[in-house]
Image: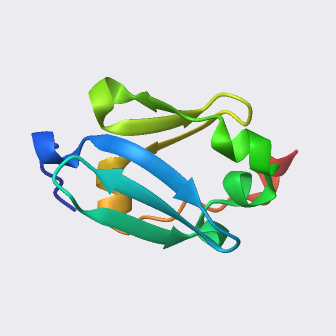
């Protein structure tokens, strides 16, 4: 799979959560909404942990320090859920 370099309009400006999804607003006016089930760390996090996010990666990523989760705008735009953990990685 070929990925392109992030474009300036793909910078993250805001993040919001509801019960089943979260949405990321981009500088170009787009909003990406994805199911929380795609991101188990966010799904299992407390609401206060979800709200504690920071823009990272020069504006193209989101970091949640309380749960050590990082997502990129590009990954969200590509519809990429978090990789599933293998049994050996769970130990």
Quadrant in which the C terminus appears: top right
76 or 59: which is nearer to us?
59
Give the residue drawn at x 24%, y 62%. Answer: 30
21 or 38: which is nearer to us?
21
Image coords of residue 9 (percent x, y): 14, 46
Q: Is residue 35 visible?
A: yes
The reply, left or right, for residue 74 in relation to residue 53 is: left
Image coords of residue 83 (percent x, y): 57, 59
Image coords of residue 62 (percent x, y): 46, 38
Color theme of the render: rainbow
Image coords of residue 64 (percent x, y): 61, 35
| Mark count | 0
The reply, left or right, for residue 21 in relation to residue 48 is: left
Q: Is residue 7 visible?
A: no
Give the residue drawn at x 30%, y 31%. Answer: 59
Quadrant in which the N terminus appears: bottom left
Residue 25 against residue 77 in the figure, above or below: above
75 or 25: which is nearer to us?
25
The reply, left or right, for residue 3 in relation to residue 31 is: left
Residue 61 location, quadrant:
top left
The reply, left or right, for residue 37 in relation to residue 35 is: right
Give the residue drawn at x 65%, y 35%. Answer: 52
Give the residue drawn at x 36%, y 65%. Answer: 32
């Amino acid at each position: 799979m070929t990925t392109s370099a992030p474009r300036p309009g793909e910078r993250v400006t805001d993040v919001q959560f509801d019960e089943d999804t979260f949405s990321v607003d981009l500088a170009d006016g787009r909003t990406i909404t994805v199911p929380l089930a795609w991101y188990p760390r966010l799904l299992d996090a407390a609401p206060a942990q979800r709200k504690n996010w920071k823009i990272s990666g020069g504006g193209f990523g989101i970091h949640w320090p309380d749960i050590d989760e990082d997502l990129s705008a590009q990954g969200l735009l590509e519809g990429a859920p978090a990789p599933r953990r293998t049994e050996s990685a769970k130990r």
